[in-house]
Image (tube, rainbow, N blue to C red):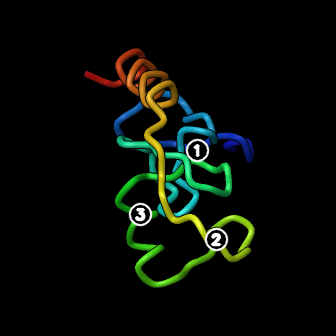
Amino acid sequence: MVSPATAVDDHLNEPIPFEFLCPITNKIMKDPVTAADGYNYERRAIRRWFRKKRSSPMTNETLTNLEVRPNDDLRNRIESYVREHSEV
Protein backbone atom coordinates (compact mmCIF):
# COMPACT_ATOMS: atom_id res chain seq x y z
CA MET A 1 0.00 0.00 0.00
CA VAL A 2 1.29 3.48 -0.90
CA SER A 3 1.26 6.10 1.83
CA PRO A 4 -0.76 9.31 1.27
CA ALA A 5 2.51 11.24 0.91
CA THR A 6 3.71 9.21 -2.06
CA ALA A 7 2.54 7.80 -5.37
CA VAL A 8 3.92 5.24 -7.78
CA ASP A 9 5.03 5.80 -11.37
CA ASP A 10 5.39 2.91 -13.82
CA HIS A 11 8.91 4.05 -14.80
CA LEU A 12 10.26 4.40 -11.28
CA ASN A 13 11.00 1.57 -8.90
CA GLU A 14 10.15 3.59 -5.77
CA PRO A 15 7.18 5.63 -4.55
CA ILE A 16 7.33 9.28 -5.62
CA PRO A 17 7.36 11.99 -2.94
CA PHE A 18 4.02 13.81 -2.93
CA GLU A 19 5.69 17.21 -3.43
CA PHE A 20 6.97 16.04 -6.85
CA LEU A 21 3.42 15.52 -8.15
CA CYS A 22 1.34 18.21 -9.80
CA PRO A 23 -1.89 18.63 -7.80
CA ILE A 24 -3.82 19.14 -11.07
CA THR A 25 -2.53 16.16 -13.08
CA ASN A 26 -1.31 13.93 -10.23
CA LYS A 27 1.75 13.20 -12.36
CA ILE A 28 5.40 13.86 -11.65
CA MET A 29 6.29 17.40 -12.72
CA LYS A 30 8.84 18.11 -15.44
CA ASP A 31 8.51 21.91 -15.47
CA PRO A 32 7.34 22.93 -11.98
CA VAL A 33 6.26 26.50 -11.38
CA THR A 34 5.01 28.32 -8.31
CA ALA A 35 1.76 30.24 -8.59
CA ALA A 36 0.60 33.20 -6.52
CA ASP A 37 -1.18 30.82 -4.13
CA GLY A 38 2.24 29.45 -3.10
CA TYR A 39 1.65 25.98 -4.55
CA ASN A 40 3.69 24.25 -7.24
CA TYR A 41 2.14 23.00 -10.48
CA GLU A 42 3.23 21.62 -13.83
CA ARG A 43 3.51 24.71 -16.07
CA ARG A 44 1.21 23.41 -18.82
CA ALA A 45 -1.44 22.25 -16.34
CA ILE A 46 -1.68 25.54 -14.46
CA ARG A 47 -1.74 27.55 -17.69
CA ARG A 48 -4.67 25.43 -18.90
CA TRP A 49 -6.36 25.92 -15.52
CA PHE A 50 -5.94 29.70 -15.68
CA ARG A 51 -7.47 29.81 -19.17
CA LYS A 52 -10.72 28.51 -17.64
CA LYS A 53 -10.57 29.78 -14.05
CA ARG A 54 -9.01 32.65 -12.12
CA SER A 55 -8.72 30.69 -8.90
CA SER A 56 -6.30 28.51 -7.02
CA PRO A 57 -6.71 24.80 -7.80
CA MET A 58 -5.76 24.08 -4.19
CA THR A 59 -7.83 26.63 -2.25
CA ASN A 60 -10.42 27.72 -4.84
CA GLU A 61 -9.73 31.32 -3.82
CA THR A 62 -9.77 33.95 -6.56
CA LEU A 63 -6.30 34.94 -7.74
CA THR A 64 -5.63 38.43 -9.09
CA ASN A 65 -2.08 37.48 -10.10
CA LEU A 66 -1.97 34.65 -12.63
CA GLU A 67 1.77 34.80 -13.19
CA VAL A 68 3.93 31.80 -12.34
CA ARG A 69 7.61 31.54 -11.41
CA PRO A 70 9.87 28.64 -12.36
CA ASN A 71 10.79 26.50 -9.37
CA ASP A 72 14.30 25.46 -10.40
CA ASP A 73 15.14 23.97 -7.00
CA LEU A 74 12.16 21.63 -7.15
CA ARG A 75 12.87 20.76 -10.80
CA ASN A 76 16.47 19.86 -9.90
CA ARG A 77 15.33 17.68 -6.99
CA ILE A 78 12.78 15.90 -9.19
CA GLU A 79 15.33 15.31 -11.97
CA SER A 80 17.83 13.95 -9.45
CA TYR A 81 15.21 11.66 -7.92
CA VAL A 82 14.13 10.35 -11.32
CA ARG A 83 17.76 9.66 -12.34
CA GLU A 84 18.43 7.78 -9.11
CA HIS A 85 15.23 5.72 -9.13
CA SER A 86 14.55 5.00 -12.80
CA GLU A 87 14.40 1.42 -13.99
CA VAL A 88 16.84 1.25 -16.87
Q: Amino acid at mark 2?
A: Leu
Q: For this view, does 7 lie left or right of residue 86?
A: right
Report helix, strand or loop for mark 3: helix
Which residue is identified by label 1?
A: 7
Asked where in the image residue 43 lies, by quadrant, the reply is: bottom left
Quarter of the image that includes the N terminus: top right
First in residue order: circle 1 vs circle 2: 1
Q: Amino acid at mark 3?
A: Ala
Q: Nearer the viewer, residue 29 or 37?
A: 37
Which residue is identified by label 2?
A: 63
Q: Is residue 80 above or below residue 19?
A: above
Q: Residue at x 35, y 24 (%)?
A: 86
Q: Is residue 27 above or below residue 6?
A: below
Relative image position of residue 57 (x, y in whole percent): 62, 69
Closer mark to the observer between disc 3 and disc 2: 2
Relative image position of residue 79 (x, y in whole percent): 38, 25
Q: For this view, does 30 lie left or right of residue 35?
A: left
Q: Residue at x 39, y 72 (%)?
A: 48
Report how far apart the C-alphas of labels 3 and 1 lie in the structure.
19 Å
First in residue order: circle 3 vs circle 1: 1
Which residue is identified by label 3?
A: 45
